[in-house]
Amino acid sequence: MRVFLQPRPLFIILSVLCFLAFWLSLALGPVSLPLVDTLRAAIRLTGIPIQGDNLEQAELIVGQIRLPRTLLGLAVGAVLALSGVAMQGLFRNPLADPGLVGVSSGAALGAALAIVGGSFFGGLPDAFEPYLLSLCAGIGGLAVAAMVYRLGRHNGQTSVATMLLAGIALTALASSTIGLFTYLADDATLRTLTFWNLGSLNGASYVRLWPLLLVCVVIICWLPRRAKALNALLLGESEARHLGVEVESLKRELIFCTALGVGAAVAAAGMIGFIGLIVPHLVRLLAGPDHRVLLPASALAGASLLLFADLFARLVLAPAELPIGIVTAFLGAPFFLYLLVRGRS
Amino acid sequence: MLQAENVRIQRGTKTVLEKIDLDLRPGEMLGVLGPNGAGKSTLLGALCGELKPASGEVRLDGRPLAHWSAAARAQRLAVLPQSSTLSFSFRVEEVVAMGRMPHDSGHVRDAEVIHAALQAADAAHLMGRSYTALSGGERQRVHLARVLAQLWPGGNGQTLLLDEPTSALDPLHQHTTLQAVREFADRGAAVLVILHDLNLAARYCDRLLLLEGGRPFALDSPDAVLQPDALKTVFGLEVLVQRHPERGHPLIIAR
Protein backbone atom coordinates (compact mmCIF):
# COMPACT_ATOMS: atom_id res chain seq x y z
CA MET A 1 0.00 0.00 0.00
CA ARG A 2 1.36 3.39 -0.95
CA VAL A 3 1.34 6.05 1.73
CA PHE A 4 0.79 9.55 0.42
CA LEU A 5 2.16 12.69 1.94
CA GLN A 6 -0.39 14.69 3.90
CA PRO A 7 -1.30 18.02 2.27
CA ARG A 8 0.23 20.18 5.01
CA PRO A 9 3.82 18.83 4.91
CA LEU A 10 3.57 18.67 1.12
CA PHE A 11 2.67 22.34 0.84
CA ILE A 12 5.38 23.30 3.33
CA ILE A 13 8.02 21.39 1.36
CA LEU A 14 6.85 22.80 -1.99
CA SER A 15 6.66 26.36 -0.66
CA VAL A 16 10.19 26.13 0.72
CA LEU A 17 11.37 24.68 -2.60
CA CYS A 18 9.64 27.42 -4.54
CA PHE A 19 11.10 30.13 -2.32
CA LEU A 20 14.56 28.61 -2.67
CA ALA A 21 14.22 28.50 -6.46
CA PHE A 22 13.04 32.10 -6.46
CA TRP A 23 15.95 33.23 -4.30
CA LEU A 24 18.62 31.36 -6.27
CA SER A 25 17.12 32.57 -9.52
CA LEU A 26 17.55 36.16 -8.31
CA ALA A 27 21.08 35.57 -7.05
CA LEU A 28 22.78 33.42 -9.68
CA GLY A 29 23.82 34.37 -13.18
CA PRO A 30 26.76 35.86 -15.08
CA VAL A 31 27.27 38.20 -12.12
CA SER A 32 26.55 36.10 -9.06
CA LEU A 33 25.33 38.08 -6.09
CA PRO A 34 25.78 37.06 -2.46
CA LEU A 35 22.55 35.48 -1.25
CA VAL A 36 22.10 37.95 1.59
CA ASP A 37 22.59 40.94 -0.70
CA THR A 38 20.03 39.48 -3.11
CA LEU A 39 17.51 39.22 -0.32
CA ARG A 40 18.23 42.76 0.85
CA ALA A 41 17.92 44.12 -2.67
CA ALA A 42 14.66 42.28 -3.20
CA ILE A 43 13.29 43.68 0.05
CA ARG A 44 14.40 47.19 -0.93
CA LEU A 45 12.57 46.76 -4.23
CA THR A 46 9.32 46.27 -2.38
CA GLY A 47 9.81 49.77 -0.95
CA ILE A 48 11.11 48.92 2.52
CA PRO A 49 14.29 50.99 2.93
CA ILE A 50 16.98 48.84 4.52
CA GLN A 51 20.59 49.89 4.65
CA GLY A 52 23.55 48.06 3.17
CA ASP A 53 26.79 48.54 1.27
CA ASN A 54 26.87 48.40 -2.52
CA LEU A 55 23.21 47.47 -2.74
CA GLU A 56 22.66 49.77 -5.72
CA GLN A 57 24.26 47.37 -8.17
CA ALA A 58 22.43 44.38 -6.72
CA GLU A 59 19.19 46.30 -6.77
CA LEU A 60 19.73 47.17 -10.41
CA ILE A 61 20.51 43.62 -11.49
CA VAL A 62 17.73 42.10 -9.45
CA GLY A 63 15.13 44.70 -10.29
CA GLN A 64 15.81 45.17 -13.97
CA ILE A 65 16.95 41.76 -15.14
CA ARG A 66 16.43 38.91 -12.74
CA LEU A 67 13.13 39.75 -11.08
CA PRO A 68 11.13 39.94 -14.32
CA ARG A 69 12.82 36.77 -15.52
CA THR A 70 12.14 34.98 -12.26
CA LEU A 71 8.52 36.11 -12.13
CA LEU A 72 8.14 35.01 -15.74
CA GLY A 73 9.56 31.57 -14.88
CA LEU A 74 7.30 31.33 -11.85
CA ALA A 75 4.17 32.18 -13.82
CA VAL A 76 5.03 30.06 -16.86
CA GLY A 77 5.83 27.05 -14.68
CA ALA A 78 2.64 27.38 -12.64
CA VAL A 79 0.43 27.96 -15.67
CA LEU A 80 1.91 25.08 -17.68
CA ALA A 81 1.61 22.67 -14.76
CA LEU A 82 -2.01 23.71 -14.15
CA SER A 83 -2.77 23.34 -17.86
CA GLY A 84 -1.30 19.86 -17.69
CA VAL A 85 -3.57 18.97 -14.77
CA ALA A 86 -6.59 20.37 -16.63
CA MET A 87 -5.75 18.44 -19.82
CA GLN A 88 -5.16 15.19 -17.96
CA GLY A 89 -8.43 15.64 -16.10
CA LEU A 90 -10.28 16.43 -19.30
CA PHE A 91 -8.92 13.43 -21.17
CA ARG A 92 -8.97 11.28 -18.02
CA ASN A 93 -5.51 10.18 -18.99
CA PRO A 94 -2.20 10.92 -17.26
CA LEU A 95 -0.32 11.13 -20.57
CA ALA A 96 -2.13 14.20 -21.85
CA ASP A 97 0.05 17.30 -21.95
CA PRO A 98 -0.51 20.62 -23.71
CA GLY A 99 2.69 20.09 -25.69
CA LEU A 100 1.89 16.54 -26.73
CA VAL A 101 -1.66 17.16 -27.86
CA GLY A 102 -0.61 20.14 -29.95
CA VAL A 103 -1.99 23.02 -27.90
CA SER A 104 1.48 24.58 -27.53
CA SER A 105 2.18 24.43 -31.25
CA GLY A 106 -1.23 25.86 -31.98
CA ALA A 107 -0.45 28.72 -29.64
CA ALA A 108 2.96 29.20 -31.23
CA LEU A 109 1.32 29.32 -34.64
CA GLY A 110 -1.13 31.91 -33.36
CA ALA A 111 1.76 34.01 -32.07
CA ALA A 112 3.71 33.53 -35.31
CA LEU A 113 0.69 34.62 -37.36
CA ALA A 114 0.46 37.74 -35.21
CA ILE A 115 4.16 38.54 -35.68
CA VAL A 116 4.16 37.96 -39.42
CA GLY A 117 0.84 39.71 -39.88
CA GLY A 118 2.13 42.55 -37.72
CA SER A 119 5.34 42.96 -39.70
CA PHE A 120 3.21 43.05 -42.84
CA PHE A 121 1.45 46.09 -41.45
CA GLY A 122 4.72 47.65 -40.30
CA GLY A 123 5.03 46.10 -36.84
CA LEU A 124 2.64 45.64 -33.96
CA PRO A 125 1.99 48.67 -31.77
CA ASP A 126 4.48 48.45 -28.87
CA ALA A 127 2.00 49.05 -26.08
CA PHE A 128 -0.39 46.28 -27.13
CA GLU A 129 2.11 43.83 -28.57
CA PRO A 130 2.30 41.45 -25.57
CA TYR A 131 -1.48 41.44 -25.19
CA LEU A 132 -2.11 40.90 -28.89
CA LEU A 133 0.44 38.08 -28.95
CA SER A 134 -1.14 36.43 -25.90
CA LEU A 135 -4.56 36.76 -27.44
CA CYS A 136 -3.53 35.29 -30.80
CA ALA A 137 -1.59 32.51 -29.10
CA GLY A 138 -4.60 31.81 -26.91
CA ILE A 139 -6.89 31.59 -29.93
CA GLY A 140 -4.43 29.26 -31.70
CA GLY A 141 -4.23 27.05 -28.61
CA LEU A 142 -8.01 27.07 -28.21
CA ALA A 143 -8.55 26.02 -31.82
CA VAL A 144 -6.14 23.10 -31.54
CA ALA A 145 -7.43 22.01 -28.10
CA ALA A 146 -11.02 21.98 -29.36
CA MET A 147 -10.04 20.13 -32.53
CA VAL A 148 -8.00 17.45 -30.74
CA TYR A 149 -10.83 16.98 -28.29
CA ARG A 150 -13.40 16.60 -31.06
CA LEU A 151 -11.22 14.18 -33.03
CA GLY A 152 -10.28 12.14 -29.97
CA ARG A 153 -13.86 11.43 -28.99
CA HIS A 154 -16.18 8.91 -30.47
CA ASN A 155 -19.56 7.90 -29.03
CA GLY A 156 -18.81 9.57 -25.73
CA GLN A 157 -15.52 7.73 -25.34
CA THR A 158 -12.15 9.44 -25.41
CA SER A 159 -9.58 7.56 -27.42
CA VAL A 160 -6.13 8.45 -26.23
CA ALA A 161 -4.44 6.98 -29.28
CA THR A 162 -6.54 9.08 -31.65
CA MET A 163 -6.01 12.13 -29.47
CA LEU A 164 -2.22 11.78 -29.44
CA LEU A 165 -2.14 11.06 -33.16
CA ALA A 166 -4.35 14.06 -33.86
CA GLY A 167 -1.97 16.06 -31.66
CA ILE A 168 1.00 14.88 -33.71
CA ALA A 169 -0.73 15.75 -36.98
CA LEU A 170 -1.77 19.20 -35.79
CA THR A 171 1.68 19.83 -34.30
CA ALA A 172 3.24 18.93 -37.64
CA LEU A 173 0.81 21.18 -39.46
CA ALA A 174 1.45 24.08 -37.11
CA SER A 175 5.24 23.71 -37.12
CA SER A 176 5.43 23.40 -40.89
CA THR A 177 3.39 26.59 -41.18
CA ILE A 178 5.77 28.27 -38.75
CA GLY A 179 8.62 26.78 -40.83
CA LEU A 180 7.15 28.37 -43.93
CA PHE A 181 6.99 31.73 -42.17
CA THR A 182 10.60 31.28 -41.04
CA TYR A 183 11.64 30.60 -44.60
CA LEU A 184 9.91 33.69 -45.90
CA ALA A 185 10.61 35.99 -42.97
CA ASP A 186 13.09 38.85 -42.82
CA ASP A 187 15.90 38.77 -40.24
CA ALA A 188 14.16 40.51 -37.38
CA THR A 189 11.03 38.40 -37.68
CA LEU A 190 13.16 35.29 -37.99
CA ARG A 191 14.83 35.93 -34.65
CA THR A 192 11.51 36.26 -32.84
CA LEU A 193 10.12 33.16 -34.54
CA THR A 194 13.12 31.01 -33.58
CA PHE A 195 12.73 32.17 -30.02
CA TRP A 196 9.17 30.83 -30.01
CA ASN A 197 10.17 27.41 -31.21
CA LEU A 198 12.75 26.73 -28.53
CA GLY A 199 11.38 28.59 -25.57
CA SER A 200 13.40 30.87 -23.35
CA LEU A 201 12.97 33.14 -20.37
CA ASN A 202 15.69 35.36 -21.80
CA GLY A 203 14.76 38.94 -22.49
CA ALA A 204 11.97 38.96 -19.93
CA SER A 205 10.50 42.36 -19.33
CA TYR A 206 7.69 43.66 -17.20
CA VAL A 207 5.72 44.57 -20.32
CA ARG A 208 5.71 40.95 -21.47
CA LEU A 209 5.03 39.78 -17.96
CA TRP A 210 1.70 41.48 -17.27
CA PRO A 211 -0.64 39.56 -19.57
CA LEU A 212 0.81 36.28 -18.35
CA LEU A 213 0.56 37.25 -14.67
CA LEU A 214 -3.05 38.26 -15.25
CA VAL A 215 -3.87 34.90 -16.88
CA CYS A 216 -1.90 33.08 -14.20
CA VAL A 217 -3.93 34.71 -11.41
CA VAL A 218 -7.21 33.98 -13.21
CA ILE A 219 -6.36 30.31 -13.67
CA ILE A 220 -4.97 29.87 -10.16
CA CYS A 221 -8.19 31.33 -8.77
CA TRP A 222 -10.52 29.50 -11.13
CA LEU A 223 -9.33 25.92 -11.51
CA PRO A 224 -9.21 24.97 -7.80
CA ARG A 225 -12.91 25.89 -7.54
CA ARG A 226 -13.56 23.03 -9.95
CA ALA A 227 -11.33 20.54 -8.12
CA LYS A 228 -14.19 18.37 -6.87
CA ALA A 229 -15.85 18.35 -10.28
CA LEU A 230 -12.52 17.34 -11.82
CA ASN A 231 -12.30 14.45 -9.37
CA ALA A 232 -15.78 13.32 -10.36
CA LEU A 233 -14.90 13.66 -14.04
CA LEU A 234 -12.18 11.03 -13.56
CA LEU A 235 -14.99 8.52 -12.90
CA GLY A 236 -16.34 9.15 -16.38
CA GLU A 237 -18.53 11.78 -17.95
CA SER A 238 -21.88 10.18 -17.24
CA GLU A 239 -20.86 9.34 -13.67
CA ALA A 240 -19.86 12.97 -13.14
CA ARG A 241 -23.21 14.06 -14.56
CA HIS A 242 -25.03 11.73 -12.15
CA LEU A 243 -23.07 13.32 -9.33
CA GLY A 244 -24.47 16.71 -10.26
CA VAL A 245 -21.59 18.10 -12.33
CA GLU A 246 -22.56 20.19 -15.36
CA VAL A 247 -20.10 18.25 -17.49
CA GLU A 248 -20.39 20.19 -20.73
CA SER A 249 -19.64 23.53 -19.11
CA LEU A 250 -16.83 21.99 -17.08
CA LYS A 251 -15.22 20.67 -20.26
CA ARG A 252 -15.53 24.06 -21.91
CA GLU A 253 -13.93 25.72 -18.90
CA LEU A 254 -11.04 23.26 -18.91
CA ILE A 255 -10.34 23.70 -22.63
CA PHE A 256 -10.63 27.45 -22.25
CA CYS A 257 -8.32 27.64 -19.21
CA THR A 258 -5.73 25.43 -20.91
CA ALA A 259 -5.78 27.39 -24.14
CA LEU A 260 -5.64 30.72 -22.31
CA GLY A 261 -2.82 29.56 -20.02
CA VAL A 262 -0.73 27.87 -22.68
CA GLY A 263 -1.38 30.76 -25.06
CA ALA A 264 -0.16 33.34 -22.55
CA ALA A 265 2.81 31.17 -21.53
CA VAL A 266 3.84 30.56 -25.14
CA ALA A 267 3.44 34.23 -26.02
CA ALA A 268 5.68 35.23 -23.11
CA ALA A 269 8.31 32.48 -23.15
CA GLY A 270 7.87 30.35 -26.27
CA MET A 271 7.28 26.62 -26.38
CA ILE A 272 8.45 24.94 -23.20
CA GLY A 273 7.47 21.31 -23.26
CA PHE A 274 6.83 18.57 -20.74
CA ILE A 275 6.27 20.71 -17.63
CA GLY A 276 2.56 19.94 -17.88
CA LEU A 277 3.36 16.23 -18.07
CA ILE A 278 6.07 15.81 -15.45
CA VAL A 279 4.77 18.02 -12.68
CA PRO A 280 1.26 16.59 -12.18
CA HIS A 281 2.77 13.11 -12.30
CA LEU A 282 5.33 13.83 -9.62
CA VAL A 283 2.71 15.45 -7.42
CA ARG A 284 0.35 12.49 -7.87
CA LEU A 285 3.14 10.13 -6.86
CA LEU A 286 3.68 12.19 -3.70
CA ALA A 287 0.16 13.17 -2.75
CA GLY A 288 -2.37 11.11 -4.69
CA PRO A 289 -4.76 12.17 -7.45
CA ASP A 290 -7.16 14.40 -5.46
CA HIS A 291 -7.41 17.65 -7.44
CA ARG A 292 -8.01 19.70 -4.30
CA VAL A 293 -4.35 19.04 -3.45
CA LEU A 294 -3.07 18.33 -6.94
CA LEU A 295 -3.96 21.73 -8.42
CA PRO A 296 -2.28 24.07 -5.92
CA ALA A 297 0.62 21.66 -5.38
CA SER A 298 1.23 21.39 -9.13
CA ALA A 299 1.27 25.17 -9.46
CA LEU A 300 3.97 25.41 -6.78
CA ALA A 301 5.94 22.45 -8.10
CA GLY A 302 5.69 23.66 -11.72
CA ALA A 303 6.97 27.10 -10.76
CA SER A 304 9.89 25.58 -8.81
CA LEU A 305 10.81 23.08 -11.54
CA LEU A 306 10.81 25.71 -14.26
CA LEU A 307 12.98 28.07 -12.20
CA PHE A 308 15.49 25.28 -11.50
CA ALA A 309 15.50 24.31 -15.19
CA ASP A 310 16.11 27.95 -16.07
CA LEU A 311 18.97 28.15 -13.55
CA PHE A 312 20.47 25.09 -15.18
CA ALA A 313 19.96 26.59 -18.64
CA ARG A 314 21.80 29.78 -17.80
CA LEU A 315 24.58 28.30 -15.63
CA VAL A 316 25.66 25.16 -17.46
CA LEU A 317 27.24 26.92 -20.43
CA ALA A 318 27.70 30.35 -18.80
CA PRO A 319 28.06 32.99 -20.07
CA ALA A 320 26.18 31.46 -23.02
CA GLU A 321 22.65 30.29 -22.38
CA LEU A 322 20.67 27.23 -23.40
CA PRO A 323 17.06 27.67 -24.50
CA ILE A 324 15.03 26.33 -21.58
CA GLY A 325 12.78 24.31 -23.92
CA ILE A 326 15.81 22.11 -24.62
CA VAL A 327 16.42 21.54 -20.91
CA THR A 328 12.81 20.59 -20.16
CA ALA A 329 12.74 18.29 -23.20
CA PHE A 330 15.90 16.56 -21.97
CA LEU A 331 14.19 16.02 -18.62
CA GLY A 332 10.74 15.31 -19.99
CA ALA A 333 11.21 12.97 -22.93
CA PRO A 334 12.90 10.18 -20.93
CA PHE A 335 10.29 10.66 -18.22
CA PHE A 336 7.51 10.22 -20.78
CA LEU A 337 9.15 7.03 -22.07
CA TYR A 338 9.44 5.76 -18.52
CA LEU A 339 5.72 6.37 -18.01
CA LEU A 340 4.90 4.51 -21.22
CA VAL A 341 6.98 1.50 -20.21
CA ARG A 342 5.56 1.51 -16.69
CA GLY A 343 2.00 1.80 -18.03
CA ARG A 344 2.57 -1.29 -20.18
CA SER A 345 3.72 -3.59 -17.40
CA MET B 1 -40.87 9.37 -7.99
CA LEU B 2 -39.56 8.33 -11.33
CA GLN B 3 -42.14 7.90 -14.06
CA ALA B 4 -41.75 7.03 -17.70
CA GLU B 5 -44.60 7.68 -20.07
CA ASN B 6 -44.66 6.01 -23.46
CA VAL B 7 -40.91 6.50 -23.87
CA ARG B 8 -39.28 5.75 -27.21
CA ILE B 9 -35.53 5.87 -27.80
CA GLN B 10 -33.90 6.01 -31.21
CA ARG B 11 -30.32 5.44 -32.25
CA GLY B 12 -30.01 7.00 -35.66
CA THR B 13 -33.17 5.97 -37.45
CA LYS B 14 -33.52 2.71 -35.55
CA THR B 15 -35.93 2.48 -32.63
CA VAL B 16 -34.12 0.60 -29.88
CA LEU B 17 -36.68 0.99 -27.11
CA GLU B 18 -40.38 1.81 -27.18
CA LYS B 19 -43.70 1.69 -25.34
CA ILE B 20 -42.07 2.10 -21.96
CA ASP B 21 -44.61 3.00 -19.30
CA LEU B 22 -43.15 2.71 -15.87
CA ASP B 23 -43.93 4.03 -12.44
CA LEU B 24 -41.20 3.40 -9.94
CA ARG B 25 -42.79 3.42 -6.49
CA PRO B 26 -41.23 4.33 -3.13
CA GLY B 27 -39.93 1.34 -1.23
CA GLU B 28 -40.06 -0.87 -4.28
CA MET B 29 -37.30 -2.84 -5.93
CA LEU B 30 -38.01 -3.32 -9.61
CA GLY B 31 -35.93 -5.83 -11.52
CA VAL B 32 -35.30 -5.51 -15.26
CA LEU B 33 -34.66 -8.75 -17.12
CA GLY B 34 -34.09 -9.57 -20.75
CA PRO B 35 -31.61 -11.14 -23.15
CA ASN B 36 -28.55 -9.26 -24.43
CA GLY B 37 -29.57 -6.38 -26.63
CA ALA B 38 -33.14 -6.29 -25.33
CA GLY B 39 -32.71 -2.64 -24.34
CA LYS B 40 -32.01 -2.91 -20.61
CA SER B 41 -29.12 -0.47 -20.49
CA THR B 42 -30.91 1.78 -22.98
CA LEU B 43 -33.85 1.87 -20.57
CA LEU B 44 -31.52 2.87 -17.75
CA GLY B 45 -29.98 5.54 -19.97
CA ALA B 46 -33.42 6.93 -20.72
CA LEU B 47 -34.50 6.90 -17.08
CA CYS B 48 -31.43 8.83 -15.89
CA GLY B 49 -31.60 11.42 -18.67
CA GLU B 50 -28.47 10.23 -20.45
CA LEU B 51 -30.50 9.39 -23.58
CA LYS B 52 -33.15 11.80 -24.82
CA PRO B 53 -36.45 10.13 -25.69
CA ALA B 54 -37.59 10.58 -29.29
CA SER B 55 -41.09 10.71 -27.89
CA GLY B 56 -42.63 10.35 -24.47
CA GLU B 57 -41.30 11.71 -21.24
CA VAL B 58 -39.44 10.76 -18.07
CA ARG B 59 -40.46 12.63 -14.93
CA LEU B 60 -38.85 12.85 -11.54
CA ASP B 61 -41.31 13.98 -8.85
CA GLY B 62 -43.70 15.05 -11.58
CA ARG B 63 -41.17 17.35 -13.26
CA PRO B 64 -39.58 16.39 -16.60
CA LEU B 65 -36.05 15.14 -16.04
CA ALA B 66 -34.56 17.77 -18.35
CA HIS B 67 -35.97 20.57 -16.17
CA TRP B 68 -33.93 19.50 -13.15
CA SER B 69 -30.57 21.11 -12.51
CA ALA B 70 -27.79 18.54 -12.41
CA ALA B 71 -27.07 19.27 -8.76
CA ALA B 72 -30.69 19.02 -7.55
CA ARG B 73 -31.25 15.84 -9.52
CA ALA B 74 -28.13 14.25 -8.10
CA GLN B 75 -29.55 14.62 -4.59
CA ARG B 76 -32.48 12.39 -5.51
CA LEU B 77 -31.31 10.15 -8.30
CA ALA B 78 -28.18 8.01 -8.24
CA VAL B 79 -26.98 5.76 -11.03
CA LEU B 80 -24.54 2.86 -10.97
CA PRO B 81 -23.26 2.12 -14.49
CA GLN B 82 -22.06 -1.29 -15.58
CA SER B 83 -18.40 -0.41 -15.42
CA SER B 84 -16.32 2.59 -14.56
CA THR B 85 -13.08 3.74 -16.10
CA LEU B 86 -11.34 5.24 -13.11
CA SER B 87 -7.61 4.79 -13.68
CA PHE B 88 -6.23 7.12 -11.03
CA SER B 89 -5.17 5.73 -7.67
CA PHE B 90 -7.72 7.29 -5.35
CA ARG B 91 -8.13 5.65 -1.99
CA VAL B 92 -11.34 3.66 -1.61
CA GLU B 93 -12.93 6.13 0.82
CA GLU B 94 -12.11 9.00 -1.55
CA VAL B 95 -14.04 7.26 -4.33
CA VAL B 96 -17.01 6.78 -2.03
CA ALA B 97 -16.70 10.38 -0.83
CA MET B 98 -17.40 11.53 -4.40
CA GLY B 99 -20.92 10.27 -3.80
CA ARG B 100 -21.33 13.03 -1.23
CA MET B 101 -20.56 15.76 -3.78
CA PRO B 102 -24.19 16.80 -4.34
CA HIS B 103 -24.63 17.37 -0.60
CA ASP B 104 -23.31 20.04 1.70
CA SER B 105 -23.59 17.87 4.75
CA GLY B 106 -20.22 18.66 6.29
CA HIS B 107 -17.12 16.63 6.93
CA VAL B 108 -18.31 14.74 10.00
CA ARG B 109 -21.62 13.63 8.52
CA ASP B 110 -19.92 12.67 5.25
CA ALA B 111 -17.43 10.46 7.07
CA GLU B 112 -20.29 8.69 8.88
CA VAL B 113 -22.19 8.15 5.65
CA ILE B 114 -19.11 6.91 3.79
CA HIS B 115 -18.42 4.39 6.50
CA ALA B 116 -22.02 3.20 6.64
CA ALA B 117 -22.25 2.88 2.85
CA LEU B 118 -18.98 0.96 2.68
CA GLN B 119 -20.25 -1.35 5.39
CA ALA B 120 -23.54 -1.88 3.54
CA ALA B 121 -21.63 -2.85 0.39
CA ASP B 122 -19.38 -5.11 2.48
CA ALA B 123 -16.34 -3.07 1.47
CA ALA B 124 -15.41 -1.43 4.77
CA HIS B 125 -12.30 -3.58 5.02
CA LEU B 126 -11.04 -2.00 1.78
CA MET B 127 -10.72 1.45 3.37
CA GLY B 128 -7.26 2.90 2.94
CA ARG B 129 -6.54 0.75 -0.11
CA SER B 130 -5.85 2.25 -3.51
CA TYR B 131 -8.77 1.83 -5.93
CA THR B 132 -6.53 0.78 -8.81
CA ALA B 133 -5.16 -2.13 -6.76
CA LEU B 134 -8.62 -3.67 -6.27
CA SER B 135 -10.11 -6.62 -8.12
CA GLY B 136 -13.08 -6.18 -10.44
CA GLY B 137 -15.58 -7.36 -7.87
CA GLU B 138 -14.10 -5.15 -5.16
CA ARG B 139 -14.27 -2.15 -7.47
CA GLN B 140 -17.91 -2.91 -8.19
CA ARG B 141 -18.69 -2.93 -4.47
CA VAL B 142 -16.83 0.33 -3.96
CA HIS B 143 -18.93 1.97 -6.68
CA LEU B 144 -22.08 0.54 -5.14
CA ALA B 145 -21.00 2.13 -1.83
CA ARG B 146 -20.49 5.38 -3.73
CA VAL B 147 -24.04 5.49 -5.10
CA LEU B 148 -25.47 4.34 -1.76
CA ALA B 149 -23.56 7.19 -0.09
CA GLN B 150 -25.04 9.60 -2.62
CA LEU B 151 -28.58 8.87 -1.35
CA TRP B 152 -27.77 7.70 2.19
CA PRO B 153 -29.69 6.67 4.25
CA GLY B 154 -32.23 6.28 1.45
CA GLY B 155 -35.79 7.34 1.91
CA ASN B 156 -39.01 8.33 0.30
CA GLY B 157 -38.42 10.43 -2.81
CA GLN B 158 -35.05 8.98 -3.69
CA THR B 159 -34.32 6.77 -6.65
CA LEU B 160 -31.47 4.39 -7.29
CA LEU B 161 -30.77 2.91 -10.74
CA LEU B 162 -28.34 -0.02 -10.90
CA ASP B 163 -26.97 -1.64 -14.06
CA GLU B 164 -25.95 -5.22 -13.30
CA PRO B 165 -24.48 -4.51 -9.87
CA THR B 166 -23.64 -8.19 -9.35
CA SER B 167 -21.96 -9.00 -12.67
CA ALA B 168 -18.43 -9.29 -11.23
CA LEU B 169 -19.32 -10.61 -7.80
CA ASP B 170 -18.86 -14.02 -6.17
CA PRO B 171 -22.05 -15.83 -5.06
CA LEU B 172 -21.86 -14.60 -1.47
CA HIS B 173 -21.43 -10.98 -2.51
CA GLN B 174 -24.20 -11.21 -5.09
CA HIS B 175 -26.49 -11.85 -2.15
CA THR B 176 -24.96 -9.38 0.33
CA THR B 177 -25.06 -6.67 -2.32
CA LEU B 178 -28.68 -7.22 -3.28
CA GLN B 179 -29.59 -7.58 0.40
CA ALA B 180 -28.04 -4.14 1.03
CA VAL B 181 -30.01 -2.72 -1.90
CA ARG B 182 -33.16 -4.43 -0.60
CA GLU B 183 -32.69 -2.75 2.80
CA PHE B 184 -32.19 0.55 1.03
CA ALA B 185 -35.53 0.06 -0.68
CA ASP B 186 -37.15 -0.99 2.58
CA ARG B 187 -36.21 2.40 4.01
CA GLY B 188 -38.35 4.02 1.33
CA ALA B 189 -36.13 4.53 -1.72
CA ALA B 190 -37.25 3.37 -5.15
CA VAL B 191 -34.79 0.99 -6.81
CA LEU B 192 -34.53 -0.20 -10.37
CA VAL B 193 -31.96 -2.92 -10.93
CA ILE B 194 -30.90 -4.65 -14.13
CA LEU B 195 -30.10 -8.30 -13.46
CA HIS B 196 -29.17 -11.36 -15.46
CA ASP B 197 -29.70 -13.95 -12.77
CA LEU B 198 -33.40 -14.89 -12.74
CA ASN B 199 -33.20 -16.43 -9.29
CA LEU B 200 -31.61 -13.34 -7.75
CA ALA B 201 -34.37 -11.28 -9.37
CA ALA B 202 -37.05 -13.63 -8.05
CA ARG B 203 -35.67 -13.45 -4.55
CA TYR B 204 -35.05 -9.73 -4.08
CA CYS B 205 -37.40 -7.84 -6.40
CA ASP B 206 -41.02 -6.79 -5.79
CA ARG B 207 -41.81 -6.44 -9.46
CA LEU B 208 -40.08 -7.53 -12.63
CA LEU B 209 -39.97 -5.92 -16.06
CA LEU B 210 -39.21 -8.37 -18.82
CA LEU B 211 -37.87 -6.74 -21.98
CA GLU B 212 -37.77 -8.31 -25.40
CA GLY B 213 -36.48 -6.62 -28.54
CA GLY B 214 -36.77 -3.13 -27.10
CA ARG B 215 -40.35 -3.56 -25.85
CA PRO B 216 -41.81 -4.54 -22.52
CA PHE B 217 -42.96 -8.15 -22.60
CA ALA B 218 -44.30 -8.30 -19.06
CA LEU B 219 -44.36 -6.08 -15.96
CA ASP B 220 -45.69 -7.76 -12.86
CA SER B 221 -44.79 -9.64 -9.67
CA PRO B 222 -42.02 -12.26 -9.93
CA ASP B 223 -44.63 -15.01 -9.59
CA ALA B 224 -46.56 -13.72 -12.59
CA VAL B 225 -43.58 -12.85 -14.79
CA LEU B 226 -41.34 -15.86 -14.24
CA GLN B 227 -43.47 -18.40 -16.13
CA PRO B 228 -41.95 -21.13 -18.30
CA ASP B 229 -43.80 -19.91 -21.41
CA ALA B 230 -42.68 -16.31 -21.03
CA LEU B 231 -39.06 -17.31 -20.40
CA LYS B 232 -39.17 -19.64 -23.40
CA THR B 233 -40.45 -16.81 -25.60
CA VAL B 234 -38.03 -14.14 -24.39
CA PHE B 235 -34.86 -16.09 -23.66
CA GLY B 236 -35.49 -19.17 -25.80
CA LEU B 237 -34.72 -21.18 -22.68
CA GLU B 238 -36.62 -24.25 -21.49
CA VAL B 239 -37.05 -23.99 -17.74
CA LEU B 240 -38.76 -25.59 -14.79
CA VAL B 241 -40.23 -23.22 -12.23
CA GLN B 242 -40.30 -24.55 -8.68
CA ARG B 243 -40.80 -22.97 -5.28
CA HIS B 244 -37.87 -22.12 -3.08
CA PRO B 245 -38.25 -24.71 -0.30
CA GLU B 246 -37.66 -22.17 2.50
CA ARG B 247 -38.63 -18.80 1.08
CA GLY B 248 -41.38 -19.67 -1.33
CA HIS B 249 -40.26 -17.40 -4.21
CA PRO B 250 -40.03 -18.90 -7.71
CA LEU B 251 -36.88 -20.87 -8.43
CA ILE B 252 -35.86 -21.16 -12.07
CA ILE B 253 -34.08 -24.32 -13.18
CA ALA B 254 -32.89 -24.74 -16.76
CA ARG B 255 -34.06 -28.05 -18.22
Image (cartoon, coloured by chain):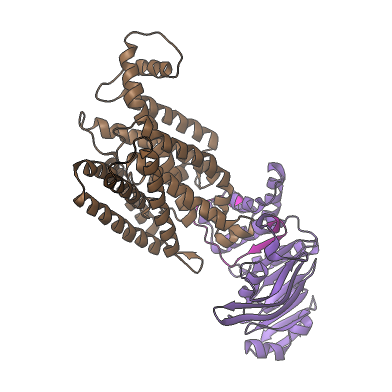
> In the figure, what tint was chain A given?
brown
| Residue A275 appearing in the image | yes
Above or below, B85 relative to A106: below
Which quarter of the figure is the C terminus of chain A placed in? bottom left
- The magenta stretch is B72-93
Side of B115 where A168 appears, left or right: left
Q: Position of residue B209 (x, y in %)?
A: 72, 79
Q: Position of residue B190 (x, y in %)?
A: 76, 66
Please identify the quarter of the rendering in which residue A191 is found: top left
> In the figure, what tint was chain B given?
purple
Side of A206 where A91 appears, left or right: right
Above or below, B7 relative to B149: below
Q: Position of residue A271 (x, y in %)?
A: 32, 45
| Residue B244 appearing in the image | no
In the image, is residue B76 part of the stretch drawn in magenta?
yes
In the image, is residue A20 part of the stretch drawn in magenta?
no
